[in-house]
Amino acid sequence: MPARVASASQSVACESATMAAGVTAGELMRRAGRAVAEVIIERFPRDGWPEVVIAAGPGNNGGDGRIIGEVLSSAGYRVQLVETATGSAGDIGETPLIVDALLGTGSTGAPRGNIAPMIAAIEAGRAAGAKVVSVDLPSGLDASSGEFEGAITADLTLALGTMKRGMLLSREVCGEILVLDIGLTEGSELTSLPLLVDREWVRRRVPIIPRTAHKGTRKRLAVVGGGRGMAGAAILTGRGALRSGIGLLHVLVDSENVGAIHAGIPEALAGSWPETPEALASLGQLSDVIAIGPGLGRSNRTRELVETVLLAYSGRVVLDADALNDFENDVKSLAVLLDGRPAIITPHPAELGRLLGISTRQVLNRRFDIGAELSRQLGAAVLLKGTPTVVFAPGGERYATASGTAALATGGSGDILTGICATLLSQMDNAGEAAACAAFTHGRAAELCNGVRGVTLDDVLRAMPAAWNERGTPPR
C-alpha cells in the first residue's frame, strides 16, 4: 500500500486518530521503535556494525530511540544511548553507526540548546565515515516547510507511518527514504492525504499492450504546437508519446515548421495548424486525444487557435505551456471550453500562478493543496510540476510523485511529460491516475540515467523503455 504525504499537523492528526481507535501512545511508540530496529538489523548486520550510538531527544522521537536501543541490544549490538537530558555531544564519540532520534515532527526552526552541539557531533561523525540513520525525519528538518537550517544530513531516513512533506521538499538531507508501517488507522485523517506514487502502484494501473495490438488500439494522438522557431517543443512531445506506446502520432505546427517535424520525427504525420473547418473536422475524426500547447507561442492568434480546437473537438485533451498561458487569470473561460471532458493540464508553478492570478511564491507555499479547487472547477486533472510533482483530480484525490533528478530541470523536459500524459490519457479511463503514472515514469526514466551532469533529454527518452519495463513488472 503506497504511503501518504503529511504535514506536521496532519501527521499528529493521524496518530491521534489511531490512539482514539484504541491504540495507546506507548504501543504506537513500541511499534515505531521495533520497525526502525528491524530495518537497522537488516541493513547494518551486527557482524559489520557491532556498535551503535543512539542520540535521543526529549520528546516522542527520543522515546522511539530508547526502544530502538532495547531491541538492538537484545539482538547483540553494543548500544550507547546518549540522551540530551543527561549526555553531551562529547559522548557521541567515534562509532560506525549513529541513530538520530533527537527531534521529530513537532520541531521548527534551527536546532537550539544542547541539541545543536549534538547535531554538530553527529555531522562530524558522518564526515569521518559513520553512517547516520534518522528516525522519522532528520533532526532540524521542518516536517511541513522543508526548511533545514542546522539539520542533520542522513544516509537513511526511516519515516514513521507517513512521508513528511518537508522530506520531499528537501530530499538532499534525507538520503534514502523508507516509509515504515506502524499501523496507523485508515480513517479520513490518513486517506484524505496525498498518495505517494510508487512503481507498484503505477504497474497496477498502466495497461499492458497486448500482442494483438495495432496502431488503432494503441490510440491516436494529435499534437498542436510548434509556433515559429519552436518546433523542438512539439518534437519532444511527440517523442515522449512514441516512447510511451502511442499508436499513431500527428503533429500540427506553424506551416514553416512542417519540414522540421518530418526531419525530427519520421514516424509522425506532419501538417500545419488546423484553422479551417475541414482541418478541424479531420482532426476530430483522426484523434483519440489532443495535446495542445508545446511551443505554441502566445498571441491573439494562438488563443483563438486553442479556443477553436477545443470548441470543434469534444474528446480528451492535455493542455500545457502556452495553451494555459493564453488563459491568464481566466479560469472560467477555460472551464467552459473543457466542458467536463477527460482532461489534464500540466502547469509549472509560474504557469499555475498566471492562470490563478497569484504569485509563484504563493503557489510554492501551497503546492500540496493549491490545485484542488482548480481541478474541481475545471473538471480536469491538474499536474503541478516540481519537486515533488503533485497531481490533483476532480474527485478530490491527490497524488505526489517523488521520482526524478535535476536532469529534468532543463528546457523541453515538460514537453516530453506532455507526450507521456497524452498517451496514458488516451489509454486509461482516469485522468488523475494517468497524470500521476506519467509523472512517476518521467521521473523514473531520469533516475535510470544514473547522473545529472552530462545527461540530456535524449538520454531520458532512451531510458523510458527501461522505466516502463523494469525487472519484476510485466512489459507494458
Image (tube, rainbow, N blue to C red):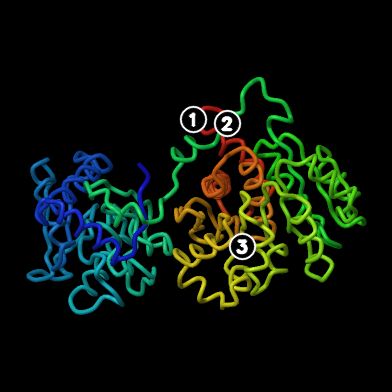
Q: What's the amino acid at mark 1?
A: Thr
Question: Which residue position is annotated with label 1?
Answer: 473
Q: For residue 476, which numbered disc appears in the image?
A: 2
**Residue 449 in view (yes/no):** no
Q: What's the amino acid at mark 3?
A: Pro
Which residue is at a point 67% across and 57% down the rendered structure image?
A: 319
Q: Earlier in the sequence, mark 3 or mark 1?
A: 3
Camera-side residue of 401 and 302 = 302
Position of residue 109 measured from the top left corner of the image (x, y, whole percent): 31, 77
Q: How far apart are marks 3 and 2 (CA)?
A: 27 Å
The answer to whether 423 is drawn above or below residue 343 in the figure is: above
Position of residue 115 measured from the top left corner of the image (x, y, whole percent): 20, 73
Q: Circles 1 and 2: CB distance less than 8 Å?
A: yes
Q: How far apart are marks 3 and 1 (CA)?
A: 30 Å
Which residue is at a point 66% across and 46% down the rendered structure image?
A: 422
Question: Which residue position is annotated with label 3?
Answer: 347
Q: In the shown orientation, is residue 3 left or right of residue 73?
A: right
Which residue is at a point 17% across and 52% down the rendered structure image?
A: 52
